[in-house]
Amino acid sequence: MHHATALAHPNIAFIKYWGDLDPCLRLPANGSLSMNLDGLETRTQVSFDAALPADSLSVNGQEVSGAGLARVSELLERVRQRAGMRLPARVESENNFPMGAGIASSASAFAALALAASHAAGLRLSEAELSRLARTGSGSACRSVPGGFVEWQAGQQDEESYAFSIAAPEHWRLVDCIVLVSQAHKLVGSTEGHALALTSPLQAGRVADAPRRLDICRRAVCERDFAALAEVVELDSNLMHAVMITSTPPLFYWQPATLAVMRAVQAWRAQGLPACYTIDAGPNVHVLCPEEAVGEVASRLRRLKGVKQVLTVAPGGAARLAG
Ligand code: PMV
């Protein structure tokens, strides 16, 4: 039996990935940039074992079959082919954050799976190779392989499409205040969402302008320029949601409380409080602020109507093997 356990953090994108050039390989339509989320993590154990009848998967102690297992088996198959072995695997994955609590678990899940499975199979992959492998399970998972502030270069083919760190977690004490307004499970997952992106007439414009936004964002992170970061992060999130709501069929992820948080954050920033929002494929809002402002920002957020919970999260490190 060959086994390994790995841990990975989820990440929040400052510049979003939305839409694929190649949905099978999950080559993205545009480059993206994110921050890993410290304290939140997925721990995944992979055991390749000749005694097993087939691949199996449990997530937080619950057996998973069907499409969820098939997606994991696909990544395991890539690993088996590369390692030249055929053993079935048992995968056991645990998140220390609640599923459906508005924090995407697929990024941390596939980053941890790529690291644990490749190691268990005897492969010793470079960070870029691991990032590419994680990407095939969930695009944004490639950004959970390196640590801190991470850029995913889009690339035109598999070899060119991976993520790398542009700054360590200690570089900038930014905080992500994760504002939970709904615990409901999302209606349309991101894999389906990416496939709809090109049905929006706005996607071409969003993608064409993405390199410019990425440059501004990268510079803002490197120079710790919060004012510049705030403008480009909100613009990028608004552009992605404009594409979502103008797709066929349209995807509306916001709840009334989502918009209330967005408007409050904009008003506070206009008054001089450094904070900005970004929203993924769901109703919850990520409010970014420098560490000095987190006390004020989080307490104001908690007083807003419709806000159920606020988690405050610092920049996190790279995916790693346990023990
Ligand atoms: O990796 P996926 O397929 O779950 O897509 C992630 C999509 C967003 O979270 C909305 C944006 C992003 O870049 O993380």
Image: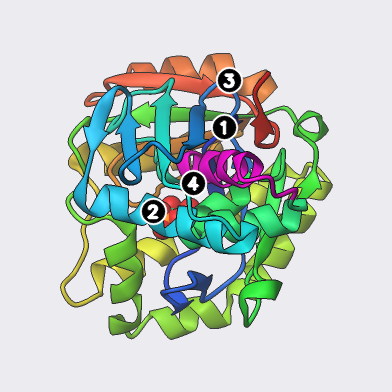
Pair 2/4: label in front: 2
Q: Which callout, 2 or 3, points at the residue further toward the start of the chain?
A: 2
- The residue under the point 25% across, 74% down is 246
Q: Are marks 4 and 1 in contact (CB under 8 Å)?
A: no
Circle 3: residue type: Val
Q: Is residue 64 left or right of residue 144?
A: left
* In the image, the residue with mark 3 has its CB under 8 Å from the nearest atom of ligand 1: no
Q: CA distance from mark 2 to mark 4?
A: 11 Å
Q: Which element is circle 2 on?
A: helix
Q: Residues within 10 Å of mark 4 (few under 14, many from 20)?
A: many
Vertical relation: 255 (above or below) 6: below
Q: Which callout, 3 or 4, points at the residue further toward the start of the chain?
A: 4
Pair 2/1: label in front: 1
Q: Which element is circle 1 on?
A: strand
Q: CA distance from mark 4 to mark 1?
A: 17 Å
Which residue is at the front of the view, 61 or 151?
Answer: 61
Pair 2/3: label in front: 2
**Label disc, if present, on residue 110 of the rendered structure:** 4
Q: Which callout, 3 or 1, points at the residue further toward the start of the chain?
A: 1
Q: Which residues are magenta?
A: 107-124
**Label disc, if present, on residue 73 of the rendered structure:** 2
Residue 63, position as x, y percentages in the image: 24, 32
Q: CA distance from mark 2 to mark 3?
A: 41 Å
- The residue under the point 73% across, 27% down is 173
Quadrant field for ligand 1: bottom left
Q: CA distance from mark 3 to mark 4?
A: 30 Å
Circle 2: residue type: Ser
Circle 4: residue type: Phe
**Label disc, if present, on residue 294 of the rendered structure:** 3
Residue 3 sits inside the magenta stretch: no
